[in-house]
């Protein structure tokens, strides 16, 4: 499998991580899961994923802090990031967009929505 099909899924809830991993793997993505926000930047540097699916609320560091770090690092400033949150309030979406999220989904969501968002942002990044 080519490296452009790698995804880093950053989700601390095991049942949610497994459901997302399953649907993305069935669609041909190679999915690595990281449950701890403190370890994410190192995993991104090692894995070099095509897309990051990033939960907002994580142990160790928040997804918004991680996204801010990615957007200020020239190596990852344009890396497609799909933000996930259990709090679908407008202010959470606004904070994710201001931090540079490529796309945003509020929990609960259908697995098909995650797959569609990943495919959309990966295709847009490759085209642009």
Image: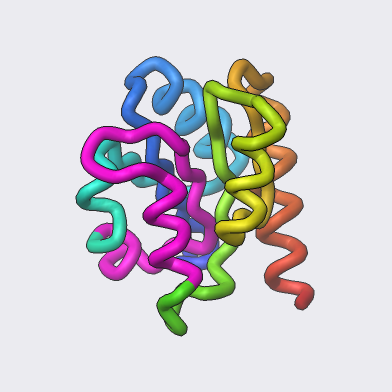
Residue extent of the magenta highlight: 43-71
Pick the residue in front: 39 or 18: 39
Above-or-below relation of 96 to 108: below
Residue 44 in picture, x, y percent from top left: 34, 62
Residue 125 horizontal side relative to residue 64, left or right = right
Q: Is 82 included in the stretch rendered in magenta? A: no
Above-or-below relation of 74 to 113: below
Pick the residue in front: 49 or 95: 95
Residue 113: image quadrant is: top right
**Exactly how many numbered labels are in the figure?**
0
Residue 39 in picture, x, y percent from top left: 21, 51
Residue 126: image quadrant is: bottom right
Above-or-below relation of 89 to 117: above
Which residue: 39% across, 68% down? 48
Residue 123 horizontal side relative to residue 26, left or right = right
Which residue: 25% across, 34% down? 59
Which residue: 56% across, 54% down? 81
Residue 4 in picture, x, y percent from top left: 53, 66
Residue 119 in picture, x, y percent from top left: 70, 49
Which residue: 78% across, 74% down? 127
Image quadrant occupied by the C terminus: bottom right
Residue 80: image quadrant is: bottom right
Residue 60 horizontal side relative to residue 17, left or right = left
Pick the residue in front: 24 or 89: 89
Name the residue at the front extreme: 91
Q: How is the image coloured?
A: rainbow
């Amino acid at each position: 499998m080519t490296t452009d099909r790698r995804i880093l899924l950053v989700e601390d809830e095991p049942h949610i991580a497994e459901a997302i991993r399953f649907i993305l793997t069935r669609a041909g993505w190679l999915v690595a899961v990281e449950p701890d926000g403190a370890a994410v930047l190192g995993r991104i540097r090692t894995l070099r994923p095509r897309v990051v699916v990033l939960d907002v609320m994580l142990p160790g560091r928040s997804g918004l802090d991680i996204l801010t770090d990615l957007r200020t690092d020239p190596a990852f400033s344009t890396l497609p990031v799909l933000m996930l949150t259990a709090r679908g309030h407008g202010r959470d979406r606004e904070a994710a967009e201001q931090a540079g999220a490529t796309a945003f989904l509020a929990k609960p969501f259908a697995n098909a929505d995650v797959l569609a968002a990943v495919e959309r942002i990966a295709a847009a990044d490759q085209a642009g």
